[in-house]
C-alpha cells in the first residue's frame, strides 16, 4: 500500500516540477527569440550604415549570412540547451521527488505500523484473559462434582482477570485522553515533596504487606505542572519498585536540585532489569523476562512506564532508568525548576 502511494506521490511531484520547467523554458525561449530577433536586426542595420552616417545599399554589400539564418542558428542552440536542461531537471526531479515523497510518507507509515501493532497487542492482551476465563468456566460447568469452594475459587480467578482488563482499559483511556487534551493549560505550582508522600500513601497497604521500608530524603521543592498526573507518575514507579522487590527490602526516594532541574530518584533493591530489555522498557506492552518471575504475581500489561514517560515529557521533563540483573533499579526524573 505504502509503496504504491510512494510511487504515485513521486510521479505527481515529477509532473509538477517538469511541468513548471517546461512552462518556464517556453517563456524563456519565446522572450529570447524576440530579444535575439530585435538584436540581430539592429546589428545588421548598423552594418548597413557607412562611417559618415549615410545608408548603404544592402545589395552592394556581400553579407556572409542573413539575419534569418543567424536567428535560426541561435534559436536552435537555445532550444537544444533548454532540452538538455529539462532532461537534467527531469532526472534530478526523479531522485528528489522520490526522496521527498519517502520523507513525507515515512511518518504516516510509522504511525500506521504503530497503530497496527497497537491494535494487535491490545487484541492479544484482551484475548488471553478472556480465553483463561472461558476455559475455567467451561471446566467448572462440565465438572459434575464441583463444590461451592471450587466455584468461589473460579469466580475469584475471573474477578482478578476482570480487574486486570479494567486496568488495561483505564490506562489505554488515559493515554488516549492525554494525546488529545492540552494538559499544560492546567499547570500550577506543585510541591514535589507532597506528590511523593501522596504516592506513598496510595501504596501503603502494599508496602506493609511486603514489609518494605521507604527511606525518604526529601524536602519541599517546586515545579510547574499538574499535581494529579505527577502523583500518577510516582505511583507507577513506586508500584514497579514494590512489585519487583523481595520482602524486607528498602526503597529510597530522593528529591534534589541539579542545575536548573528538580530531580526525583526512586531506587529499589529488587530483581533489576536485564541489559537486553533496557532499550524497550518504555515501549507499550513490552514486558521483561523478570516480569515472569515467581516474585511477581501481577506483572501488568506493560503500559505503566510508557504512560509515566509520556506524562513526564508533557511536563517538559525527562525520565531515565539504570538497572542490572539482581542488583536493583534506579529511576531518575528531571523536571524544570520554578522560575
Image (spheres, rainbow, N blue to C red):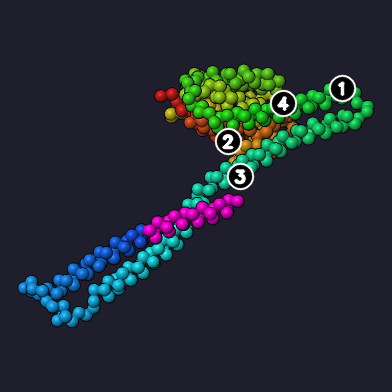
Give SS at disc 2.
Answer: strand
Disc 2 or 4, which lies upstream in sequence?
4
The answer to whether residue 217 is seen in the rendering is no
| Residue positioned 38% across, 64% down in the render | 85
> Label 3 belongs to which residue?
113
280 inside magenta stretch: no
> Is the residue under label 4 in contact with that under label 2 (CB below 8 Å)?
no
> Label 4 belongs to which residue?
163
Name which quarter of the figure residue 128 lies in.
Answer: top right
Q: CA distance from mark 1 to mark 4?
A: 21 Å
Name which quarter of the figure residue 118 lies in.
Answer: top right
Q: Residues within 10 Å of mark 2 (few under 14, many from 20)?
A: some
Name which quarter of the figure residue 239 lies in.
Answer: top right
Spot occupied by residue 43 in the image (x, y as percentages of width and height): 18, 70
Disc 1 or 4, which lies upstream in sequence?
1
Main SS, magenta region, reads helix
Name the image quarter holding the C terminus.
top left
Q: CA distance from mark 2 to mark 1?
A: 45 Å
Q: From the image, state whether disc 2 or disc 1 is nearer to you.
A: 1
Q: CA distance from mark 3 to mark 4?
A: 29 Å
Q: Relative to 37, does residue 110 appear above or below in the rendering?
A: above
| Residue positioned 76% across, 25% down in the render | 159
Q: From the image, state whether disc 3 or disc 1 is nearer to you.
A: 3
Residue range (magenta): 1-23
Give SS at disc 3.
Answer: helix
Q: Nearer the viewer, residue 243 or 164?
A: 164
7 inside magenta stretch: yes
Disc 3 or 1, which lies upstream in sequence?
3
Amino acid at each position: 500500500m505504502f509503496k504504491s502511494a510512494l510511487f504515485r506521490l513521486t510521479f505527481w511531484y515529477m509532473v509538477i516540477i517538469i511541468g513548471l520547467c517546461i512552462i518556464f523554458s517556453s517563456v524563456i525561449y519565446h522572450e529570447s527569440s524576440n530579444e535575439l530577433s530585435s538584436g540581430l536586426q539592429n546589428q545588421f542595420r548598423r552594418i548597413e550604415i557607412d562611417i559618415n552616417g549615410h545608408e548603404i545599399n544592402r545589395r552592394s554589400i556581400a553579407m556572409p549570412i542573413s539575419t534569418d539564418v543567424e536567428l535560426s542558428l541561435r534559436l536552435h542552440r537555445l532550444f537544444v540547451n533548454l532540452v538538455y536542461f529539462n532532461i537534467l531537471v527531469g532526472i534530478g526531479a526523479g531522485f528528489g521527488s522520490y526522496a521527498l515523497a519517502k520523507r513525507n510518507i515515512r511518518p504516516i507509515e510509522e504511525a500506521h505500523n504503530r497503530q497496527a501493532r497497537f491494535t494487535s497487542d491490545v487484541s492479544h492482551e484482551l484475548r488471553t484473559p478472556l480465553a483463561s476465563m472461558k476455559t475455567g468456566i467451561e471446566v467448572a460447568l462440565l465438572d459434575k462434582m464441583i463444590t461451592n469452594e471450587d466455584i468461589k475459587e473460579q469466580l475469584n480467578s475471573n474477578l482478578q482477570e476482570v480487574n486486570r482488563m479494567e486496568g488495561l482499559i483505564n490506562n489505554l483511556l488515559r493515554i488516549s485522553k492525554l494525546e488529545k487534551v492540552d494538559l499544560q493549560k492546567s499547570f500550577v505550582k506543585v510541591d514535589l515533596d507532597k506528590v511523593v508522600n501522596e504516592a506513598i500513601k496510595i501504596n501503603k497497604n502494599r508496602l506493609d504487606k511486603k514489609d518494605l521500608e521507604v527511606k525518604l530524603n526529601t524536602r519541599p521543592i517546586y515545579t510547574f505542572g499538574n499535581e494529579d498526573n505527577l502523583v500518577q507518575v510516582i505511583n507507577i514507579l513506586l508500584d514497579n519498585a514494590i512489585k519487583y522487590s523481595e520482602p524486607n527490602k528498602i526503597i529510597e526516594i530522593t528529591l534534589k536540585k541539579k542545575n536548573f532541574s528538580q530531580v526525583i530518584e526512586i531506587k529499589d533493591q529488587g530483581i533489576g532489569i536485564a541489559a537486553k530489555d533496557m532499550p524497550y522498557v518504555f515501549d507499550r506492552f513490552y514486558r521483561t523476562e523478570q516480569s515472569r518471575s515467581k516474585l511477581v504475581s501481577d506483572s501488568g500489561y506493560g503500559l505503566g512506564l510508557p504512560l509515566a514517560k509520556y506524562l513526564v515529557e508533557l511536563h517538559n521533563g525527562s525520565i531515565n532508568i539504570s538497572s542490572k540483573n539482581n542488583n536493583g533499579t534506579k529511576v531518575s526524573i528531571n523536571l524544570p525548576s520554578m522560575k
